[in-house]
Amino acid sequence: MDDAILLPVYNEEATVDMVIGAIRAYFPGEIIVVNDGSTDATAEVLDMRDDILVLNHPENMGYGRSLIDAFVFAQFAGLERVVTMDCDLQHEPAHIPEFLLELGQGGDIISGSRYLPTSRVVGTVPEDRRAVNERVTKEINAVTGWGITDAFCGFKAYRLEAVADLGLSEPGYGMPMELWAKAY
């Protein structure tokens, strides 16, 4: 096993089973779910599945901490590459093979975007959140010269060796900013 999908979840009882089912259509390998102290029925939904591995935080520790813990576990398990997805139905699992292909061609981090013209729109991002994302993305691009379009997109693929070298530590939603700064 070289690849896995990582799903950080917190109170996702309404969507987690559907997302895992959609992933299975494109990825037969390991799916590692980090249940970040959910207080709804997420744990019970996950317990009904026998095709996933669940890591449980006893309390909510944060989005960044969930991903960092999943990265550490995946590396310990001998995995080389992972794809992260959020469980809010904003990411299209059909792109998983493309992300892994890009990693195979030498990339360290492949980032998705919810804001490309061809991106499928699911729901509405609150205007204040989208405005913050646009400002942060613009600043990251100004400093790095990159052309990312969605700095906070949770749909990414990583070579775990590259992630381990970054020394990520931000436990909350600021983790993507730390990721981009340290990757640069």
Image: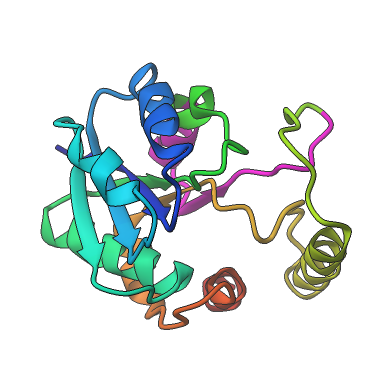
Start-end of magenta stretch: 98-117
Q: Nearer the viewer, residue 58 or 28?
A: 58
Name the residue: 84% across, 62% down.
134
Of all residues shown, which one is farthest toward the front? 40
- Which percent across, then down, holds residue 45? 29, 39
Q: Is residue 11 magenta?
A: no
Q: Is residue 181 left or right of residue 158?
A: right
- Which percent across, then down, holds residue 14? 47, 38
Height in image: 21 above or below 62? above
In this rendering, the count of numbered labels is 0
Q: Is residue 150 left or right of residue 75?
A: right
Name the residue: 51% across, 22% down.
94
Name the residue: 33% across, 24% down.
27
**Residue 46 sits in which quadrant?**
top left
Height in image: 169 above or below 2? below
Q: Nearer the viewer, residue 24 or 81?
A: 24
Name the residue: 82% across, 69% down.
132
- Which percent across, then down, holds residue 142? 83, 71
**Residue 66 sits in which quadrant?**
bottom left
Height in image: 112 above or below 173? above
